[in-house]
Amino acid sequence: MVAEPNNWGRFGPADQRGTLNLLTPEVVLRALGAAATGRVLSLALPIRGATSSAAPTTVPHLRGRPLPQHFMSVDGGDYAAGARPIGAGLRVADDALVVSPHGTTTHMDALCHMWSGDELYNGHPAARVRSYGATRCGIEQVGGVVARGVLFDVPRHLGLGHLPAGHRVTVGELEALVPDVRAGDVAVVRTGWPAVWRRSPEEYWSGQPGLSAEAGRWLAAHDVSAVACDNAAVGGLDSGQAAAEGLDDDLHLVLLHRHGIHLMEMLWLEELSETGRTEFVFVAAPLRIEGGTASPVNPLAIL
């Protein structure tokens, strides 16, 4: 059992959804009032997968992670080479996409993704994470997320295009941006770091800005339902692409493991930043991958 304040047992001994339980029908209906114009923005990076081109390397990703692979089982070239149509004049293209989401694309972490000791979130045995997937706290437990999204646009607040690699977002910066965080909100944090990729992948890999441990605990204390960031790990990364904090302050352990707060990473928030909106309807739905530690997502902001 974890020692610091946490949500273990709060939603029942069998709970596998954490603070997503806060998204009751009443909270969701109230969140829909955050839309004013009906404009919809995608907050996802593109998934570029190809086995015969450098396309996957043109999208921000962590070094050493398996990149997306996109295969065509049948395409126009097959028919040009003499493949028989499936019907009179009827042709079809079929493809397969392989994605390892962690560190490679916009994704949502499941509560089974990271833990300390022998227990997952809420005391579920870590031994239930098997070679074929996790039998507890997998990504299929999420369902869908519809909530009020609140944008913490930290670099814009500081007059910067993006935060420096060593910057750790403070509680004071969060409080100055959204003083009225409500239970069930999705906290969306912009660092601007994905835009660095266009300038230099080496700079992107040199480290990453992110939330401080204190800021993460502040969000947890405000009962957010999820945290979504445009960086690769919610917290900051050092030049070795690892969290510089110790286990007590590691944000994946603070949020996922101790508080049951799902994390979304590697969002694209530049267009949302340009709107100047801090409140909107946030929608995201992971794939129902049974036992999955994560899933690609296409988060939407409805303005």
Image (tube, rainbow, N blue to C red):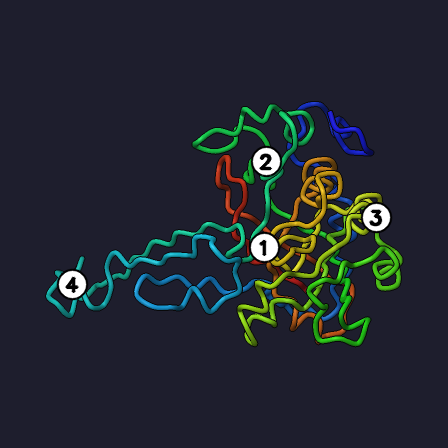
Q: What residue type is labelled 3?
A: Trp
Residue 112: mark = 2
Between the C-alphas of marks 4 and 1, the distance is 57 Å
What residue lies at 59% left-to-right and 45% top-to-bottom? 109
Residue 66, relative to residue 134: is it above or below? below
- As measured in the structure, the alpha-carbon distance from the residue carrying label 2 to the one carrying label 4 is 49 Å
Give coordinates of residue 189: x percent, y percent.
Answer: 72, 60
Q: Is mark 1 on a helix, strand or loop?
A: loop
Disc 2/disc 3 C-alpha distance (Å): 22 Å
* Mark linked to residue 88: 4
- Which residue is disc 1 drawn over? 240
Secondary element type, mark 4: loop
Which label's residue is closer to the chain start, 1 or 3?
A: 3
Mark 1 vs mark 3: give the one in front.
Answer: 1
Distance from the alpha carbon under mark 2 to that under mark 1:
24 Å
In whole angstroms, how far apart are the C-alphas of marks 4 and 3? 63 Å
Q: Quadrant of residue 116?
A: top right
Three-letter amino acid code of the residue under disc 4: Ala
- Contact check, label 2 and label 1, Cβ < 8 Å: no
- In the figure, is residue 188 to the left or right of 267? right
Q: Is disc 1 in contact with disc 3, using a CB cutoff of under 8 Å?
A: no
Question: Which residue is farthest left?
Answer: 82
Query: Which of the two discs, 2 and 1, labels the residue nearer the N terminus?
Result: 2
Q: Nearer the viewer, residue 65 or 6?
A: 65
How many numbered marks have been drawn onto this rendered protein structure? 4
Question: Residue at 58% across / 27% down in the picture?
Answer: 126
